[in-house]
Amino acid sequence: MDIPKLTPNPNFQYANTHLQSLAEHLFAVGYVAEQLLKRLIPDSAAKAEAVFVAGCLHDLGKIDPAFQEWARNPKKKDYHAEDGQHIDDSKFSFDKHPRHNEISVLLYQLLDPISFKGISSGYKTAIKHTIYWHHAKPYRKEKDSEFSTFGGIYKKLNSNLSSITFAEILEKTQRLLKQVSEIDCQYRSIEASLIAKIYSEVVDLDILELMKNTDLPSYKSYEIEDRIDNYRQQITNNALHNIMRACVISADRLVSALPAEDLHGHIKHLNLHSLVDETLLLEGNLCSQIETCMTQFPLSERSNKQHEVAQQLNKILDVAILAGPAGCGKTKIALEWALLKNSQQIIWICPRVQVCQGLFFELISEQYLPDATIEINTGEFKYTKEWGGVTQEDDYFSGDIVITTIDQVFSAIITHTKANTLINVLNAHVVFDEFHEYIPMPAFNLLFAELVACKKSQGSFANTLLVSATPHYFYLKSVLDIQPEDIITMPSFNLSSYRIEFKVFDETQRDDGNPLYQKQSGNNIVISNTAQTAQISFIRNQRDENAVLLHSKFKKTDKQSWFSEVFDSFKKDGTRKFDVLRSGPIVQASLNITCDYMVAEITTAENFLQRLGRLDRFGTNSSVNIYSVAVPEPIHQGKGTGAAARFLARQFSFAATKAWYQFLQAEALENKTLQLPELYSFYRRFHNMELAQQSMASDLLACFKQGVQLIQQKIVDPITIPPKKITEKGQGKISKHSLRGENRFVQMAICDVSKWPHIEYREEYAYQPPVNERDEFDNLTASLDEIQGYGDSDKNLLAYMKNKHHNIIGGQKAYKDFILLNEARDPEFPIYLSYTPDGLDRVGGESARHSYAIYYAVCDKQPIGAISIKQLTSNED
């Protein structure tokens, strides 16, 4: 091997500006990626070979003369790019020139002989995907289609070659791969390297004509199917791509961080494995902390059963499922499972920030793990050991237990910069808490299945636990291919009695005939399917109830403070500051709270039982607990008409909800006194019914279709935006690639409904921009559907703002909707959904108020949140 020199040699091929040998870099990345995969997924020789090849070929495109000229430039020796080494000269533009990963995949497509059968076609597809996507796509001003095919990449590259032909580029590439092969033989002391077999000695350039319209690999390969079974292979293929890509990107970053002489030394002394050791080594005392925690719980029949369930879960070879009703101690069981598995780190993945918050407070308490390093890592909160104890960026995902959202983990498979997060997930013990929540969420249910498939591929090293009181047996079997014997149930030790009452009502009326609006007293929780119903019912009863309101339509600070108020009041041995909680679905699986009576709107079997889990959660009531279920008349009649049915259909849950309600009626459960084990046995029976499975499949296929459309719109393609496109201020923007729906920052005027039905319009807005640019906005967001009136021009608030805003607030008139919507990704440029009286006076006074304007309502007791003026003044839902 040539010894790298500190001064560039014009006859030498370099991988980067700190002059690593390109041949050494390619081999090292291939080898380290292979070792990462072997350590994370033992007994996977075919995968290991494929990732080795992908790593050894990932930067072939750096043989590009333009790249080599740039890398040898002495002025660039200290250059470091977060997204890898790319040409950054001001006169150079990737609008007209392919990036090295694009050239790399073109070269592999030409060099890999079809006759070579040592790697299957499926793995060859995965190799191409990994090579192409080991970097994010660049932001380009020109049409992306010019860079979307192999022919397009060739045409762009060839047009820029001057001192060398493309045929000569191929010859240089073959010599480079021969060098990589020789390094591999020396390093492993073998006679022949796989790399020597992977490329053809003779390349027929005529095949360029055949592949000129062949598309480059899609980032996510999903197609709409009419059967759930057909999605399973797509999920498996995408999971393989995720793993190989994460291994190559992580290896590339580890190797690229080395000085050239250190890389040479690692290869010469055969110790590249040390990079893998340092990456995967987990040291800590989590197990001893959990052992201490277990002694805090008194010995009892319940504790013994929890221990037995943990032991059963420990015996399951790959992915285990813990099913258990509310309050059965699933957190304690999960910790004991991790202890039996000798866990050094747990990554605890939750569906929402509120679930993370509740779990964080639970685990740092004296009863659980006060001395362990508990870390919460969400988009909003990054704290360690205590709330407000800010985690340094270098320490992200380093806690003994990392509590995070599914969104943060998805970033490993839908972005480039956080791709190494998947290595953390594969290396740790993983708990997916309340996983049933992803099932009706478009794209989330597919990407979650990918993560589970990634962990399942680890076999006996999967160390993965899925936890839910309502594990959605149909999804487990039909999508995740989880067998019944891998589902372990913790029985309920709650001996309380329950009675279900169905209250059929006219959903068009907001009066005492509607159980969701009736006045409540005592320790009660009312849960509706929408925040809007919770808001209106709270307003109507504000003078007659000692109630608190919680939902998702608050600004950030209000959401945080009222979350704490609700938890403190309704938790076990809570303050009982409030008698009644009126809420949207936000509390059904996010808060460890309890009540003595519950009213809940009809919903899916999963949500139905999750809500029930907040009723006498700790089994302390001696009298029968009443679970009053509000059923709109159309749903009672089996019809899909009406606001409630349409809402459920938009949530991909109408068919399953209707089937569950009909099942409960057929079983004649109303007014029967039951205990929790009986109710959960009905839930299992429901999932085994053919009619129920058909209904769930119908909802799920519709949801998958929507998810595939999201993915095909390239919402999940990693794209690199040039630095000048990124705001210099410390304010977070809304990503263009979010999977949780299209939202924008909004502003709205405040109205006071303390004396409802009288409404007082205040001369203030919901929040003020921060004085310090580094401080965060106390912002609000709304969906595009809300902003644009769900397609009804009369309800389009964006059009109203476009026409009136410049007269009310000042500034220039806006002419294009898409400009306003794009600017509103930044909290500095929100879309106004309502205006103060003073602002409206400038355009005609109160008569100029939009009839569907959305205000931030408040009252004497607490904020009400964002709500349409139409909803405040109407007596119908």
Image (cartoon, rainbow, N blue to C red):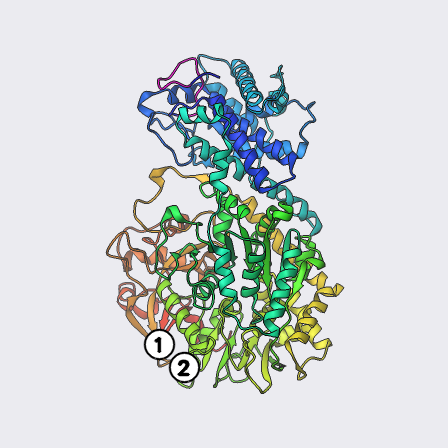
Residue 189's x, y, as percent? 59, 22
Counting every numbered tag in the picture gives 2
Q: Quadrant of residue 541?
A: bottom left
Does residue 772 appear left or right of residue 627 in this picture? Answer: left
Residue 21's x, y, as percent? 45, 21
Residue 492's x, y, as percent? 62, 73
Per the image, the residue denoted by label 2 is 542
Using the image as rendered, state which of residue 332 and residue 504 is in the foreground. Answer: 332
Does residue 680 appear left or right of residue 55 in this picture? Answer: right
Check disc 2: other Cα within 10 Å, few if <14, some if 14-19, many if 20+. Answer: many
Residue 59's x, y, as percent? 50, 27
What secondary structure is found at the residue carrying circle 2?
loop
Does residue 732 appear left or right of residue 266 in this picture? Answer: left
Q: Is residue 640 visible?
A: no
**Where 736 sits versus 563, above or below?**
above
**Where 840 sits versus 103, above or below?**
below
Per the image, the residue denoted by label 1 is 859
Look at the image and give the residue range highlighted in magenta.
Answer: 4-16
Using the image as rendered, state which of residue 98 and residue 399 is in the foreground. Answer: 399
Of pointers 2 and 1, the one earlier in the residue sequence: 2
Query: Looking at the image, do the residues carrying marks 2 and 1 touch, with CB atoms under 8 Å apart?
Result: yes
Residue located at (43% from left, 34% from top): 140
Residue 334: mark: none
Residue located at (64% from left, 51% from top): 318
Amino acid type assigned to the residue bearing label 2 in the image: Gln
